[in-house]
Image: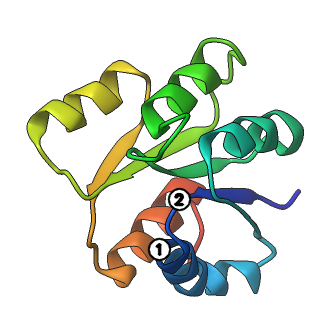
């Protein structure tokens, strides 16, 4: 069974950076799904049931904290790994991400190699 990663970010450059960084996972059969807002993220999680959601915390409309809370509570999906990303790495945001049920938090900008390493660890894959 192949794995799925959902990338959620309202900034096109960040979506492209993440897609490029994670392309080597596609070569190993991982499907990359990409959406640009929180509403689409919730629908995509419901339909696709990804193994990992890389989720921007600060988005207009439905933000990443709300998406994370919806995945955990309304959709009752406990087995999907949620990695929150934010340009604002203040402790209050890290704590808020934990409170809504995220499994990890990374501050932007990040080293693409670091995200590849983290994803490999989460999906238990060799890269």
Q: Quadrant of the C terminus?
A: bottom right
User: Mark 1 Cα within 10 Å, few/some/many (few <14, many 20+)?
Assistant: some
Outermost residue toward the front in this view: 61
Question: Residue 10, image x and y in percent?
Answer: 53, 59
User: Is 117 or 100 nearer to us in this picture?
Assistant: 100
Q: Which residue is pictured at 11% across the width and 43% down the height?
A: 90
CA gap between label 2 and label 1 equals 7 Å
Residue for badge 1: 14
Outermost residue toward the left in this view: 91
Left or right of 69 on screen, residue 34: right
Q: Earlier in the sequence, mark 2 or mark 1?
A: 2
Residue 18, placed above or below residue 27: above
Residue 41, placed above or below residue 70: below
Left or right of 21 on screen, residue 91: left
Question: Residue 3, image x and y in percent?
Answer: 77, 58
Mark 1 secondary-structure assignment: helix
Q: Which residue is pictured at 89% across the width and 56% down the height?
A: 1
Residue 95, placed above or below residue 82: above
Question: Residue 18, image x and y in percent?
Answer: 52, 75
Left or right of 15 on screen, residue 106: left
User: Is 88 or 99 nearer to us in this picture?
Assistant: 88
Q: Which residue is pictured at 69% across the width and 38% down the height?
A: 39
Residue for badge 2: 9
User: Mark 2 Cα within 10 Å, few/some/many (few <14, many 20+)?
Assistant: many
Pointers 2 and 1 in contact (C-beta within 8 Å): yes
């Amino acid at each position: 069974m192949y794995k799925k990663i959902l990338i959620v970010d309202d900034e096109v450059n960040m979506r492209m950076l993440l897609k490029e960084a994670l392309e080597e996972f596609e070569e190993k059969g991982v499907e990359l799904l990409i959406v640009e807002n929180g509403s689409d993220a919730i629908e995509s999680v419901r339909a696709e049931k990804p193994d990992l959601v890389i989720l921007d915390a600060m988005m207009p409309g439905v933000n990443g904290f709300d998406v994370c809370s919806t995945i955990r509570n309304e959709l009752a999906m406990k087995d999907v790994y949620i990695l929150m990303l934010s340009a604002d790495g203040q402790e209050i945001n890290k704590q808020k991400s934990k409170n809504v049920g995220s499994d990890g938090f990374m501050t932007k900008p990040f080293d693409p190699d670091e995200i590849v390493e983290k994803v490999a660890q989460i999906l238990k894959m060799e890269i």
